[in-house]
Amino acid sequence: MTTKTSLLKVILLGDGGVGKSSIMNRYVTNKFDAHLFHTIGVEFLNKDLEVDGHQVTLQIWDTAGQERFRSLRTPFYRGSDCCLLTFSVDDNQSFLNLGNWKKEFIYYADVKEPEKFPFVILGNKLDVTERQVSIEEVQQWCQENGNYPYYETSAKDATNVAVAFEEAVRRVLAMDERTDHLIPTDTVKLHRKPRSAGTCCS
Amino acid sequence: MVHVYNCHPFASQQIVQVEQEPGLFCCGGGALFVVATGGCKVDAYNLEQEGCPLICRFGTMGTVKSIQHSKIGDYLVTIEEKNSSTYLRAYTNWRYQAEEKARVGVRLLGHLLRGASVRGGAQMEIIEIPLSERPIAVACCSVTGDLLVGCENTLILFTLRRQNQQSLQNQCQQNLQGSWSNSQQSASQSQGHQSSSSHNLSVLDFERSVILHITKMTPKQVALCGGYLAVQAELEVLVLKLDASSEPTSLDESSDTSKDDYLEDQADLLLIPRQQELLGDQARNCDISVTIEKTGLEDKGQYTLSYVLFRRFTPEFFQGCSVEETQLHSLQLYPLFTSNQSVSTEEPACLFCFFSLPNAGYLYSLKSGVELLSAYQYPERVQEAVLSDHLLHVITKNALQCFTVRCAAVAARTEDPYIDTTMKACPPNSLQVCALRMQLFIGLRSVCVYGRHVVLLSTVDTEPREEAERSTQRRSLGRRWTISSPKETSPAGNGWNLYVVDTVSPLTLYKEMVEYSRQYAETNPQAQSLQHLLSEAHLLLRAALLQTPGQQQNDDGTSSLQEDAYRQDEGQTAVQTHRQQLEEALRQNCAQLGDCFSRASQKVCHLALPYYRMSGLSVTEVIVRNRPLPSSPHSYGLGFLFYLKHYLLEETEQKLSQESADEVIDIFSRSSPSELLSVCASPSMINVSPARTLRILQHLEDTAGVSVPLTIAMATMVQRLNDLPQYTQLMERHAEMLLVYGFIEEPRLLLHGGGGAPRTHVHPTALSRQLAKSQPGLLVAGMVALHENNKVQLEQADHIFKELGCENCLQVDFWEAMLMASSQETVIQELLFRLASVYIDRLVGTNSESGSSFPCTSQRRRSLKSTDDLINSCSHYGALYPWLIVLCPAHTTSCQHQEELYKLQSLLCGPSLSIGSVQPLLERLSEGTLWGFSLHLLCTTRRGQYDISIEKLLDRCPQAIIAYANHHLQDKNMGLWWQKLLPELCDRTRAAGENSILLAALKETLVVVATETSPAQFLELIPDDGTASYFLPHLLTCTQRHLLA
């Protein structure tokens, strides 16, 4: 009767104001607040769900997008099972920054095989009429970077949010299945404090 | 041998409604935290409410491998794994996770920035504590909330930091950087101690303060309490003390050198480690070296390290337990505050370290000397053990057992170093521990304790069904074992259960033990078991009393706001009542222990005294309790007699009624007749029936023979019967001197209350009053003897005479007699002064018209000692100088003060009286009378002012001058004959003309001068205008004497 649930850590990255917190809130509490505060540092929420017969606890990590919170968020990339790179379709710069976010994540999460790591790309604020980023542009970027799945979402209208998270779970589970039959050879990873962390609180 | 009393320390059990099989659990702050097996969620249940309802549930960031709750700060600390990495995390503000969907803040240690977490005011926060090594074990300090982490080769100490929201927000607004001020910090810290559930939410953080590198030992468990660190490996335990100090650490070098020899020595003998127990400083000789690494974060404090305890076991095979299974477990540091400590500010007065092997547990006391307090021999293999406030709970596979502990005995002695005296007592620290209960359970896995709640996890999947049923039946037979709903096996038929077993209050357990003790008392009152059980009960009550109101508040300080308010309203009085109940129970217990020891053997019977004293029972009550049953053959116990004797010796104010006093006489005449006399003399016995007692004393005399004190005691009784003739007859049976010896033997025949101790109030006995009337000399002699034998102080004796109303007569006789007897210089000087003042007072008094300055005037009688007596027998009274008799012959003074004058003169003539001290008193006497003049002249003479004396004497009474000069102008003062006296006389005769007195004196003087001087000198001395024929014969004598020489 007790099925072992697995805990999946999914992290939301992207520029400040693209709607990461709203996506998380929409998904977990099914609510939308147009006047949400900036996220400071790192916060998370858990959500239990079943995907393809697998009972999983999704631990969604919401991060602060502003540059000045960099040192507060980067220590927590480590141990992520999936990364949701988020931009806003009405903000071209946020799209252009995706590459930087990916680099930052790979660097701090200490991902062993970055090319195999499951990223999912989210283009949020689909409800806004003035688009700055076209679907084609994004799809091309995804294609070039490692064939990442791309979802256009609206936290406000609840469009595609659940689908995107479920896809993230599927990606992770697919990874696990590939590695499950491998003999776990790696020893315990020591959790080192990143160099920059020590001086960040000023 | 382990005593097993079948008590009922467990009151009820509840089953916690846990959905998934619990893996780990821990308790704290009124809550039970359960982590499902392999899960990443923590369920918090309220332990303090019926049914243990769920408080909240929150997710963790990885699979929890270890979980602990800290009372201070109300945080949880976990060791977690995620993707093969191990993390250390602290969960704070978890109570605000009431709805699971609230966002959880995460920050790194030390990154408490701009109120990241305080935006909403109340958000659960996780502090990630990065470590360079994999954490193996964690422990929280129950006093400071600090955190100790044990890794493979290091121990890392994290100090808890608090910052209240207010200051944090201020800091936020002003965009201030850096750390907050120390004052704020400490203020918030102390506030946090009071109650962490206060509305002014404080935000926690940790500071890495010390890293210890440890060799040759891999920690399995760690413990931390008030600067003490304990590390437990498979078969070793090491306890260290870390002190913050400004001095650099030098210990490492010194310990290294001292260690070397020892190690070599050991290496020769053994290849495998041997059993070792190293206490206190000795522990540094263990082969485990510990070094301090400076973290560099805090340069204000240096740390020094000292070794406290080292224990190593060898993996011996025992009771079906393989070598592999023989491992230490359940390491615990347990603090105890004494009731005169305030918990929040001080470090605990007592600290204990517990650890356990499968077959035995060990409890050490670490403060004021490290010692093994108790060793617990378990009847079967124990899986886990945990020390609670009153008891030690251990679990075996199939039972929860609880043992007694001795912490309260240690605390009692720490609190009051005079506890083992005739005033107070407490069962010894070494009193053998016992098991109070073995309660059957099925498949126990682990245990934890919060206050009176014992939480147990059982899994029955491996156990055959029959056995389970059998034990269920057995359990239902338990007298007080009530099973509360829900039913024992949950509807789902889980193979596991999480029980919360509540222990009964110490008071209830105490009452049960008392009930048991009654059975023992009836069957065999002398049995050791009765004594042991009552002692156990005593320590239980002491332990309960140590949980002072302040501490209880602190214990529960982390519980909900609602409860806090309740506590403030009603808690105070409830706590007060509870304390009174405990104190009353303790008094009862002391009374029972007193009963127990009053019948005990020679070795321990003296304990009856302190226990009866602590019971608050009156002597009469104690006598009643010890009255043998009419049918019972045995007499009074040794302890009871010891108690009674001490009580009667101790001069309390409490007077026994006649009935009780008569009973006491009976008790002693039956059990210990030799004590009868001192019993009779006790002030408590003042109401004893004299006729009855007299008969008993007479009987005693008939059997034991005549003794002086006994005769006096009998006389006392007779006197109380007002039979004066018989009294006189008894007192005349012995010579006065023997009677005095009798008083020395039993001073309480004369006075009550003294006992030789200074500054206590004394009173004369009825006999003293009688003696003052009929035999004052005997009374004075008796008092002097008592003083000289240190049975009474001078002031006390004075007080006696004051009470007898003979301040100015008998008391003066006493002082005079004291002067004769005493050899203590300070006493002598005091007495001389007092007597001189009295004499002067009397002289002044009789001189003045009022004459009423002494109260005794009306009944004045002659002094016991005359001046002659004193001069003859007391060296301080000098013989009167001959010139005094010339100066004031007896007939010139009134007979009324003749005696005083002589005594004062005699004192002034004696060697001891200090003139300087009495001089001011003498000012009161006029020189007008000759006797007054004589006293002043004595003074002047004693001061060596012979010139003035000669002049004065020639002025007032020249006929005494030759007697004076003969007495005083000798040896070195011989010169005064011709230097002073001769010229003075020559002048005066010349002026006065034919004065026969002066001429006679002059003639006498010339005789002396002629004898003492050379002819040349003599010639010089002869006045120029003198008649040659007058001086010639003397010159001739002088020359002839000189020629002869």
Image: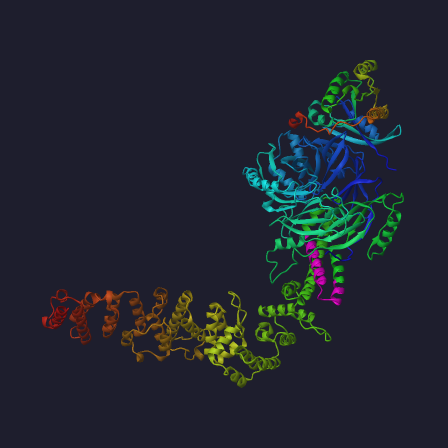
Q: Which residues are magenta?
A: B517-546
In this rendering, position of residue B377 left or right of residue B976 = right
Residue B526: say if magenta.
yes
Single out the residue that lies furthest toward the bottom. B725
- In depth, the one of B458 and A123 nearer the eye is B458
Residue A182: say if magenta.
no
Single out the residue that lies furthest toward the front. B268
Q: Residue at 86% of width from left, 35% of height from top?
A: A3
Q: How far across and how far down the image is residue B182, in percent?
A: 60, 37
Q: How far across and how far down the image is residue B435, in percent?
A: 74, 54
Q: How far across and how far down the image is residue B369, in percent?
A: 60, 50
**Eyeballing the image, is B483 above or below B813?**
above
Q: Residue at 69% of width from left, 47% of height from top?
A: B354
Q: Tell me, yes or no, if residue A157 can be seen here.
A: no
Q: Tell me, yes or no, if residue B331 can be seen here.
A: yes
**Can you say which quadrant of the picture contains the C terminus of chain B?**
bottom left
**Can you say which quadrant of the picture contains the N terminus of chain B?**
bottom right
Single out the residue that lies furthest toward the left. B1028
Q: How far across and how far down the image is residue B488, in percent?
A: 86, 48
